[in-house]
């Protein structure tokens, strides 16, 4: 009978394992850190673009002679473009490679950013923002793929942690920078700046980031005959088929339930903390997002290091046998304590504690939530790369795509929920959902071997990880 102690994926040859590890010695430690920095800068852009527009919505509506509700469609459209784009770039990266997809996608970001800045109508704004977000959305899945390519199993967590921390940090600082732009500069200038950022990112990748995929693993490498310019059709929705695996679907759902807490705290912040504590200045409201981003920034490397330590510790405990679910044990501190407590307490503080003390304690809750969320997302992100290593970009894309759909529904419901049952009950419900997600992770750890055996999507072994 399978138990929590049952190994799942083992190696049949130590020599074979050693030969595979040579693949991870292609780059120096300094090069690997540089690659992580570059892909992290690219990975924070999709959420940064969506969130930076929020404080500018009144200004944009006035300039384009539209309504706040209509301009707010940009946020939903950005989420949709992210979901579509990350699937497309990930699917093609498995055939053509990570580097080529970065070099193909970022020009869309640059052109789209320029188009957004030049928009004189709502329809023009919506079209160019779709192009802009579609172009940079590959950074979410391609970055995880690059990190899986260059770091071996026991080192992968910290790289994924930094990458996810940057992604969430971008989401948290964007409203502040967007608010500053709306208050003191111009939302158009902000998007001109994003076009310049994209050009710089494109140049750095072209000059300093080689193809990181393992030799012989790309689809184009397996073709016996190919044209000088070889164009092929790759189904972008094929990534989603990976989620038919019960364990991959379970951890995707658990990570979504944890990340909902981030969005429920941040998206209506002007409506909750802003109104409760009398904050009207857009830049100051944007600054209230910063503690959450600081929590992401601090928690990311800690969560990554913890997940690496946990996987190594349990592998030694099992006398060298690798059970991939062991990495998920690193989610406990964030999923059971930090995430539920931070959002639950924040809701109660907003409802019942006024004045500077209530505001300061709420900012502390935002900081703790920022740490807690990456303590959940990091081990799950690393786990996904571990178990389907050859399709790491694709499983990351599938997670981001479905998670974006779930988050779009959650964000659409949060303000009506606050209006009907109040901020305290809304936040308590979300805290319970986060705990439910942690229960799903517990079941995945306990029965992960059976779940994988039920549907095999081509899981990795220690030999090819």
Image: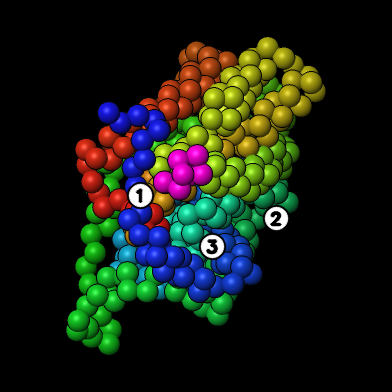
Residue occupying the point 35% across, 54% down: 11
Q: Evaluate whether residue 448 shows in this view.
A: yes
Magenta stretch, main secondary structure class: loop
Residue occupying the point 41% across, 69% down: 19
Q: How many marks are shown on the rendered structure? A: 3
Pick whichever of labels 2 and 3 is earlier in the sequence: 3
Q: Name the residue under label 1.
A: 10
Residue 45 vs residue 232: left or right? right
Residue 195 vs residue 244: left or right? right
Under circle 2, the secondary element is: loop
- How dense is the environment of label 3, judged by Cα within 10 Å: few (below 14), some, or many (20 and up)? many
Q: Name the residue under label 2.
A: 185
Q: Give the range drawn in magenta.
A: 315-322
Residue 439, by quadrant, is top left
Residue 357 vs residue 196: left or right? right
Q: At which x and y percent is residue 97?
A: 37, 70
Residue 372, by quadrant, is top right
Identify which residue, 215 or 186, lies in the foreground. 215
Outermost residue on the left side: it is 225
Under circle 3, the secondary element is: helix
Question: Where, quadrant-wise, is the N terminus in this rendering?
Answer: top left
How far is disc 1 from disc 3 in space, using C-alphas?
31 Å
- Which one is closest to the eye, mark 2 or mark 3? 3
Pick whichever of labels 1 and 3 is earlier in the sequence: 1
Q: Mark 3 points at which residue?
A: 39
Question: Where, quadrant-wise, is the C terminus in this rendering?
Answer: bottom left
- How dense is the environment of label 2, judged by Cα within 10 Å: few (below 14), some, or many (20 and up)? few
How far is disc 1 from disc 2 in space, using C-alphas?
58 Å
How far is disc 2 from disc 3 in space, using C-alphas?
29 Å
Compared with residue 208, is residue 148 higher up or lower down, i.e. above or below?
Answer: above
Instruction: Assess whether residue 149 is covered by the magenta stretch.
Output: no
């Amino acid at each position: 009978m399978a138990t929590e102690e049952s190994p799942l994926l083992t190696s049949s040859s130590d020599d074979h394992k050693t030969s595979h590890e040579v693949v991870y010695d292609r780059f120096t430690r300094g090069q690997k850190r540089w690659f992580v920095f570059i892909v992290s800068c690219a990975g924070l852009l999709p959420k940064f673009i969506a969130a930076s527009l929020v404080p500018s919505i009144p200004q944009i509506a006035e300039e384009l002679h539209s309504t706040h509700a209509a301009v707010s469609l940009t946020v939903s459209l950005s989420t949709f473009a992210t979901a579509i784009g990350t699937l497309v770039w990930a699917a093609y990266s498995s055939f053509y490679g990570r580097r080529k997809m970065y070099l193909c996608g970022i020009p869309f970001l640059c052109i789209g950013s320029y188009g957004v800045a030049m928009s004189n109508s709502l329809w023009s704004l919506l079209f160019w923002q779709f192009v802009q977000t579609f172009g940079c959305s590959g950074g979410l899945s391609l970055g995880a793929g690059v990190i899986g390519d260059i770091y071996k199993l026991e080192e992968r967590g910290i790289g994924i942690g930094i990458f996810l921390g940057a992604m969430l940090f971008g989401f948290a600082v964007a409203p502040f920078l967007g608010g500053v732009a709306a208050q003191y500069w111009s939302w158009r200038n902000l998007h001109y700046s994003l076009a310049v950022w994209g050009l710089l990112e494109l140049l750095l990748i072209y000059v300093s980031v080689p193809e990181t995929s393992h030799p012989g693993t790309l689809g184009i490498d397996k073709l016996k005959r190919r044209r000088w310019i070889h164009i092929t059709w790759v189904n972008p929705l094929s990534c989603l088929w990976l989620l038919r695996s019960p364990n991959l679907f379970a951890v995707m759902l658990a990570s979504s339930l944890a990340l909902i807490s981030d969005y429920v705290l941040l998206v209506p912040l002007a409506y909750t903390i802003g109104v409760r504590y009398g904050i009207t200045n857009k830049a100051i409201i944007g600054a209230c997002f910063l503690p959450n981003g600081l929590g992401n920034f601090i928690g990311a490397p800690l969560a990554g290091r913890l997940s690496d330590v946990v996987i190594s510790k349990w592998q030694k405990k099992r006398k060298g046998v690798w059970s991939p679910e062991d990495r998920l044990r690193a989610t406990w501190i964030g999923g059971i304590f930090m995430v539920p407590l931070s959002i639950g307490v924040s809701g109660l503080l907003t409802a019942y504690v006024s004045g500077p003390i209530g505001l300061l304690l709420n900012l502390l809750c935002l900081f703790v939530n920022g740490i807690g969320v990456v303590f959940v997302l990091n081990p799950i992100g690393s786990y996904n790369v571990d178990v389907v290593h050859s399709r790491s970009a694709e499983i990351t894309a599938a997670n981001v795509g479905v998670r974006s759909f779930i988050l779009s529904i959650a964000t659409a419901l949060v303000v009506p929920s606050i209006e009907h049952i109040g901020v305290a009950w809304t936040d308590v419900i979300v805290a319970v959902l986060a705990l439910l997600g942690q229960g799903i992770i517990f079941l995945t750890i306990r029965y992960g071997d059976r779940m994988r055996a039920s549907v095999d999507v081509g899981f990795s072994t220690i030999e090819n990880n």
